[in-house]
Each structure stands twice: as structure tokens, then as C-alpha cells.
Amino acid sequence: METSMSVAQSWQQSRTAQFTARWGPKGSVITVHGELDAANADQLDDYVQRTIRRSRRVILDLRDLEFIGTAGFSALHRINVACSAAQANWAMVPSPAVSRLLGICDPDGTLPVTTPRAEPLLRSARAGGDESRPLLQLVPQPRERLRQQPGDVHL
């Protein structure tokens, strides 16, 4: 079962985040795409807290997160507290942007971090899921003109 929740910021179209959750018998994977800042960090926190009601193991896949602000870090901290209170095991797979922020805001490594190789839930989600298919290309690349061969019929 898969659900999606998109959070679009009305003040700037480029400021979006999409949260996607996959639930399975061994746990849940929440994938975050886009940018996480003060305008949408609370929505991620709420989304994860709803997910831990269904699952005691949660992996937050942030590899496609292009930007994270300090409000995003605060949301990660709140997620950590909520998972601890619910006795849910969680970890995140950071993007380079998240890793930079964690290096500054969490130098002691308090928040749990994992890797795609170390996390079986990520291997199963990517292996058979829609994420292995390429995204639809919205802006087509110019095509070479086909040379008409003698005898070709074009309708």
C-alpha cells in the first residue's frame, strides 16, 4: 500500500516537498523529495508520527532531499523523540544536504543514520517498486530528423 502527500508552498513554486510511505510487514519506508524548510517541516513530522502508529520500524529516506533548513533539523529531532516515546526503531538515509546539516547541528551523531546497503527495507523497496523506473521526461530533448529512405511511406 502506498500513499502520498504533497506539500506545495504558495509563495514560491520551487519550494515543494513530497512524502511517500511504503508499509510492509518488516517496517515502513518514508521517502522525501524536494526541499524541507520552515514552511513544510511540521508536515513531515506529522506524516512520520502517523506512520509510527502503523509500524514499529521506520526508515526515512532523505536521499532525494535537495535542501534542508534548521526547521527540518528540528523536525528530525521531534521525530526522534516521537519514535522513542512510541518505542519505534527508526533511522534516516541522508542526502548530501542533510549530511552537511547533521555535521553542524548534530556533531555527536545523536540522530540515527543508516545507509542503503545496511538497510534491508530500502533494498526491497527499490528492487520491486516504481522508483526503479525512470521518471517521465517533461521537456523532450531534440530528436534527430529521420532521413527518408527510398521506398519509405510517411503518413
Image: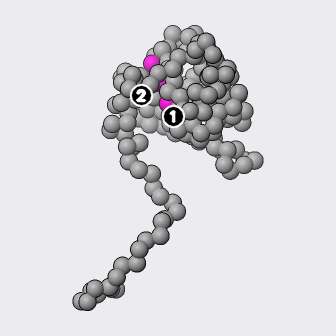
Residue 35 in picture, x, y percent from top left: 63, 39
Q: Residue at x 38, y 48 (%)?
A: 133
Residue 49 in the magenta stretch? The answer is no
Residue 90 in picture, x, y percent from top left: 50, 18
Q: Residue at x 51, y 10 (%)?
A: 87
User: Which numbered disc covers residue 144?
Assistant: none
Kind of residue at disc 1: Arg
Image quarter of the C terminus: bottom left
Residue 67 in picture, x, y percent from top left: 63, 37
User: In the rendered image, is residue 144 in sight?
Assistant: yes
SS under mark 2: loop
Mark 1, other Cα within 10 Å: few <14 / some 14–19 / many ≥20: many
Task: Please tell me how many numbered marks the rendered image carries.
Answer: 2
Residue 107 in picture, x, y percent from top left: 63, 16
Q: Residue furthest right?
A: 11
Q: Residue at x 47, y 24 (%)?
A: 59
The residue under label 1 is: 63
The residue under label 2 is: 116
